Image (cartoon, rainbow, N blue to C red):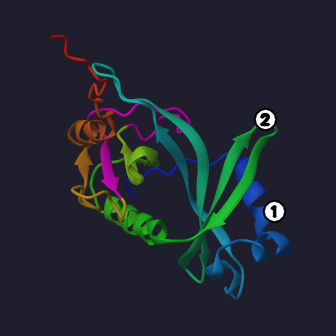
């Protein structure tokens, strides 16, 4: 398998397992699929979730790690996901969720596994565009907690993707990042101050 999935921090995994073992946490989650599952759930495919920092001209785009995401499998299929976040007290369970990104992540990972090139899979969030991508980092042995998006890295937008950006199409970061940065760039404000004419 060309994807080198990095191991999640043990405390992050333990926090998710503890939440899964808590009837209160599962019952009070806003995740109907999770509450209706019969049988055990197992957290699999841990992926570090990075948020893209503002892109500055002439600099390599950087990210910051915000979470580790686990797909929760029951009977060999993903039914929900769980995030663990880093707090002052260490890694802590954040929340369960479901939705279109769950199936979209699975599909993108399957597609990436069929390539001949080895990558380290991550998730890259671009909140300004309401966009999530599977980030295929070109260095499979890199530290998954730090991140610089290299121009040769591959970004696969997950569905639903922003208008004009095709979901599940692999883009070189060098090609997609400029498109994203144009969309994120602030719109210049027109000077609407009133100017009195002097006669």
Closer-to-camera residue (52/185): 185
Seen at 53% across and 39% down, the residue is: 144
The x and y percentages for residue 108 are 36, 63
Q: Which mark is residue 3?
A: none
Seen at 32% across and 48% down, the residue is: 155
The x and y percentages for residue 127 are 46, 47
Query: Which residue appears farthest toward the top when viewing the image?
Result: 199
State whether the magenta stretch is mostly helix, strand or loop.
loop
Looking at the rendering, which quadrant does residue 184 occupy? top left
- In the figure, is residue 126 to the left or right of 164? right
Quadrant location of the C terminus?
top left
Query: Which residue appears farthest toward the left when viewing the image?
Result: 199
* Marks 1 and 2, the one that precedes in the sequence: 1
The x and y percentages for residue 136 are 37, 47
Compared with 104, 194 (above or below) is above
Compared with 53, 94 (above or below) is below
- In the figure, is residue 69 to the left or right of 169? right
- In the figure, is residue 8 to the left or right of 47? right
Seen at 32% across and 64% down, the residue is: 111
Q: Which mark is residue 88?
A: 2
Measure the alpha-carbon separation of dots 1 and 2: 19 Å
In magenta segment, residue 154: yes
Q: Secondary structure at mark 1?
A: helix
Query: Which residue appears farthest toward the front when viewing the image?
Result: 199
Looking at the rendering, which quadrant does residue 150 occupy? top left
Which residues fall within the magenta stretch?
A: 139-157
The residue carrying mark 1 is 18
Q: Nearer the viewer, mark 1 or mark 2?
A: 2
């Amino acid at each position: 398998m060309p994807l080198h999935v990095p191991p999640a921090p043990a405390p992050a995994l333990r926090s998710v397992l503890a939440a899964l073992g808590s009837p209160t946490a599962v019952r009070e989650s806003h995740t109907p699929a999770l509450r209706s599952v019969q049988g055990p759930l197992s957290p699999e495919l841990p992926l570090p979730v990075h948020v893209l920092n503002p892109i500055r001209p002439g600099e390599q785009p950087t990210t910051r790690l915000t979470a580790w995401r686990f797909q929760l499998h029951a009977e060999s299929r993903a039914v929900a996901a769980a995030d663990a976040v880093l707090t002052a007290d260490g890694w802590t369970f954040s929340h369960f969720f479901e939705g279109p990104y769950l199936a979209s992540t699975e599909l993108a990972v399957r597609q990436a596994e069929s390539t001949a090139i080895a990558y380290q899979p991550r998730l890259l969030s671009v909140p300004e565009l309401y966009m999530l991508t599977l980030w295929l980092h070109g260095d499979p042995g890199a530290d998954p907690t730090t991140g610089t998006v290299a121009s040769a890295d591959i970004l696969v937008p997950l569905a639903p993707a922003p208008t004009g950006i095709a979901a599940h199409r692999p883009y070189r970061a060098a090609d997609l990042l400029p498109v994203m940065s144009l969309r994120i760039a602030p719109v210049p404000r027109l000077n609407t101050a009133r100017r009195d004419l002097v006669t």
